């Protein structure tokens, strides 16, 4: 099971523990790239100047907005008497030690406090300041699409790799085929995806494969629903059952799902975690989320007639409203 931290969770943890940061810190120095995420959050909360380690060592340009005055003004970066050196997490402690050595080798003689926003229990004492203690394996919102787990994961397609079709586009006919050929991409993982698991129909395999190739998305297997029509897929409620079955059979370690109701259903049915992209939250099997569970149950039980009425109302309201579920 993966531990997970979102941007919002990180910001909440920092905000609630600002007292842990020494009051006389006058500059926040981040370790690129991920370390800049908590570095800027800390800097904004404390109203301190923020820079990356390379700019600090070079005593480079000081840059900040002008809508408010900084709590501590500096005429040069190296003028800082006490810096907070920040990374997003610590695995072995090697990156932090290298960063410390670089700053000291550059001749900086001021005080340095170290901060890793997220630490394993065994490394909590390795830094002066931390905000979240979490054992490995763990996944962060800012690296979720570029983490090694992508290679052993299942990915939903619509709402994750590309936008959802609108009600107007989702006609199981020529408009839908046009959408499949030209859908706007959303997240493009750096690594090869283990399995793409979508409720798209098997008859759209060629269009789907062509889109994936055109958008340079690498994957192992593409799992589609082998039913003749969208209406039959709805009648059988095949969205989640298909995803649950593939998630179980492949032995994948994580499922990236767009919609919160389906995320809960997949987690419950598979007994494994699901990263919900809409909410950017990790849904764990057996978790009690009443609102999402109710939404999922309604989605499962709604009749084909009810779905058709809902489509008509949605289409009248806005032809641009995304249709969830693929």
Image (cartoon, rainbow, N blue to C red):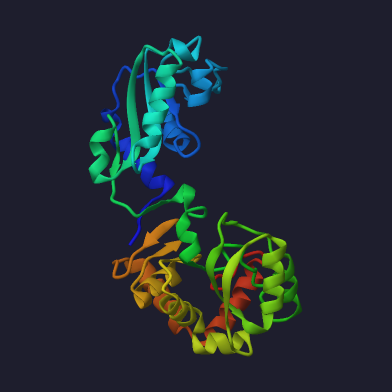
The vertical placement of 253 against 307, above or below, is above
Quadrant in the rendering for residue 14? top left
Going by the image, does 222 lie left or right of 169? left
Residue 45 appears in the picture as rendered:
no
On the image, the x and y values in percent for residue 185 come to: 65, 59
Query: Camera-side residue: 323 or 221?
Result: 221
On the image, the x and y values in percent for residue 318 come to: 65, 66
Q: How many marks?
A: 0
* Residue at image point 41% right, 73% down: 251
Quadrant in the rendering for residue 263? bottom left
Query: Camera-side residue: 241 or 247?
Result: 247
* Residue at image point 75% right, 72% down: 178
* Residue at image point 51% right, 65% down: 258
**Which quadrant is the N terminus positioned in?**
bottom left
**Which quadrant is the C terminus positioned in?**
bottom right
Quadrant in the rendering for residue 221? bottom right
On the image, the x and y values in percent for residue 323 come to: 59, 70
* Residue at image point 43% right, 62% down: 275
The vertical placement of 72 against 16, above or below, is above
Residue 275 appears in the picture as rendered:
yes
Going by the image, does 179 lie left or right of 2? right
Going by the image, does 111 lie left or right of 326? left
The vertical placement of 205 against 84, above or below, is below
On the image, the x and y values in percent for residue 246 come to: 47, 78
């Amino acid at each position: 099971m993966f531990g997970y931290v979102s941007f919002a969770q990180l910001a909440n943890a920092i905000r609630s523990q600002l007292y842990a940061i020494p009051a006389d810190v006058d500059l926040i120095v981040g370790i690129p790239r991920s370390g800049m995420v908590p570095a800027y959050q800390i800097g904004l909360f404390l109203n301190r100047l923020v820079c990356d380690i390379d700019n600090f060592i070079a005593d480079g340009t000081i840059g900040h907005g002008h809508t408010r005055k900084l709590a501590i003004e500096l005429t040069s970066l190296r003028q800082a008497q006490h810096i907070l050196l920040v990374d997003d997490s610590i695995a072995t402690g090697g990156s932090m030690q290298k960063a410390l050595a670089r700053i000291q080798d550059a001749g900086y003689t001021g005080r340095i406090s170290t901060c890793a926003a997220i630490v394993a229990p065994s490394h909590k004492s390795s830094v002066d300041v931390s905000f979240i203690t979490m054992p490995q394996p763990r996944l962060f919102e800012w690296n979720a699409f570029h983490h090694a787990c992508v290679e052993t994961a299942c990915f939903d397609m619509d709402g994750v790799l590309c936008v959802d079709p609108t009600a107007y586009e989702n006609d199981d006919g020529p408009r839908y085929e046009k959408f499949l050929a030209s859908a706007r991409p959303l997240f493009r993982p750096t690594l090869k995806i283990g399995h793409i698991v979508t409720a798209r129909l098997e008859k759209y395999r060629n269009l789907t494969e062509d889109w994936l190739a055109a958008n340079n998305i690498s994957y192992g297997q593409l799992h589609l629903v082998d039913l003749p029509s969208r209406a039959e897929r709805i009648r059988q409620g095949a969205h989640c059952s298909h995803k649950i079955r593939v998630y179980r059979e492949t032995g994948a370690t994580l499922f990236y799902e767009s919609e919160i109701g389906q995320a809960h259903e997949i987690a419950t049915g598979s007994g494994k975690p699901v990263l919900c992209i809409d909410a950017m939250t990790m849904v764990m099997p057996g978790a009690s989320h009443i609102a999402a569970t109710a939404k999922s149950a309604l989605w499962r039980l709604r009749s084909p007639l009810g779905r058709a009425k809902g489509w008509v109302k949605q289409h009248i309201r806005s032809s641009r409203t995304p249709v969830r579920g693929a």
